[in-house]
């Protein structure tokens, strides 16, 4: 096994390897060296930019509203009381369908036995349910939900003949003639036809708390069969139904 001859330098300026000689490598052109330096400079530039990067951090918040829950819509509900509880006690109920309308209790006469000139009165109350926002309430004209045969005109004539008034702030015990001949309460409707009478203003209901309903507002209806009404109305009946429209506030 032969051993390679070490690289030696001759006096002629040549190199020899294992008995072979070769010319010394020529110097590289300046352009190549410049490119190499530029390339090195670019590498250094990238490395330098990387060392200037800043630390980053993120913070997050959410719309909590109150407690641990997110943003939430308010609750809204109005209840009525027509004093139809046991023995005429207060009975606040949510009746949002015409078929479930609360029946007003009229006095001093039965509303089914009116004569011309008679007036009957009926109290009721409105309030906001527990957790509800406050409300502005208006009442519109009454409607007659009974579908009548074309030949039966007296009932329709009676509905058209009746007049009604409505006051707010008149308690059950005071819901009578004196309330409408004095300055008691706030007049909402005054001697208007059932088909056209709507409240001149709104009834304001206080907001409730999380555990208790809002304070009730007293209302008092008066229904009149005007004097001089036609005898053709005798024995006729009508069923006026009012709708209270509530808007949250």
Image (cartoon, rainbow, N blue to C red):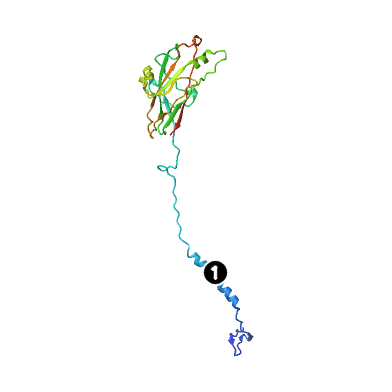
The residue nearer to you, when weighing 114 against 185, is: 185
Q: Residues within 10 Å of mark 1 (few under 14, many from 20)?
A: few
Q: Residue furthest left?
A: 173
Q: Residue 60 in the image: state x and y as whole percent.
A: 44, 50
Q: Quadrant of residue 118?
A: top left
Report the label total: 1
Would you say residue 113 is visible in this rendering?
A: no
Q: Which residue is drawn at 45% across and 31% down?
A: 247
Q: Residue 11 in the image: state x and y as whole percent.
A: 59, 90
Q: Residue 109 in the image: state x and y as whole percent.
A: 41, 13
Residue under pointer 1: 42
Figure quadrant of the N terminus: bottom right
What is the secondary structure assignment of the residue under circle 1? helix
Q: In this view, does 1 lie above or below 127?
A: below
In this rendering, would 2 be left or right of 97? right
Q: Residue 56 in the image: state x and y as whole percent.
A: 46, 58
Q: In which quarter of the image is residue 202?
A: top left
The residue nearer to you, when weighing 38 against 115, is: 115
Q: Which residue lies furthest to the top in this view?
A: 231
The residue nearer to you, when weighing 43 against 17, is: 43
Q: Quadrant of residue 209?
A: top left
Figure quadrant of the C terminus: top left
Q: Residue at x 60, y 76 (%)?
A: 31
Would you say residue 165 is visible in this rendering?
A: yes
């Amino acid at each position: 096994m032969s051993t390679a001859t070490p690289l030696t330098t001759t006096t002629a300026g040549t190199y020899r390897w294992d008995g072979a000689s070769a010319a010394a490598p020529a110097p590289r052109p300046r352009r190549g060296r410049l490119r190499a330096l530029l390339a090195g400079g670019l590498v250094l530039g990238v490395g330098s930019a990387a060392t200037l990067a800043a630390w980053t951090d993120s913070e997050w918040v959410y719309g909590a509203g109150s407690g641990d829950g997110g943003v939430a819509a308010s609750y809204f509900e109005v209840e009525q009381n027509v004093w139809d509880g046991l023995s005429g006690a207060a009975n606040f109920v949510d009746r949002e369908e015409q078929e479930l309308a609360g029946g007003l209790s009229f006095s001093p006469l039965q509303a089914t036995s009116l004569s011309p000139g008679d007036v009957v009165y009926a109290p009721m109350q409105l309030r906001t349910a527990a957790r509800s926002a406050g409300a502005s309430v208006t009442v519109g004209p009454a409607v007659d939900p009974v579908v009548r045969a074309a030949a039966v005109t007296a009932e329709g004539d009676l509905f058209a003949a009746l007049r009604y008034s409505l006051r707010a702030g008149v308690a059950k015990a005071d819901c009578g003639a004196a309330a409408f001949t004095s300055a008691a309460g706030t007049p909402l409707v005054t001697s208007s036809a059932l088909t056209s009478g709507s409240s001149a203003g709104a009834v304001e209901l206080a907001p409730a708390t999380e555990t208790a309903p809002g304070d009730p507002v007293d209302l008092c209806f008066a229904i009149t069969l005007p004097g001089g009404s036609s005898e053709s109305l005798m024995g006729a009946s009508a069923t006026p139904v009012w709708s209270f429209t509530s808007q949250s506030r």
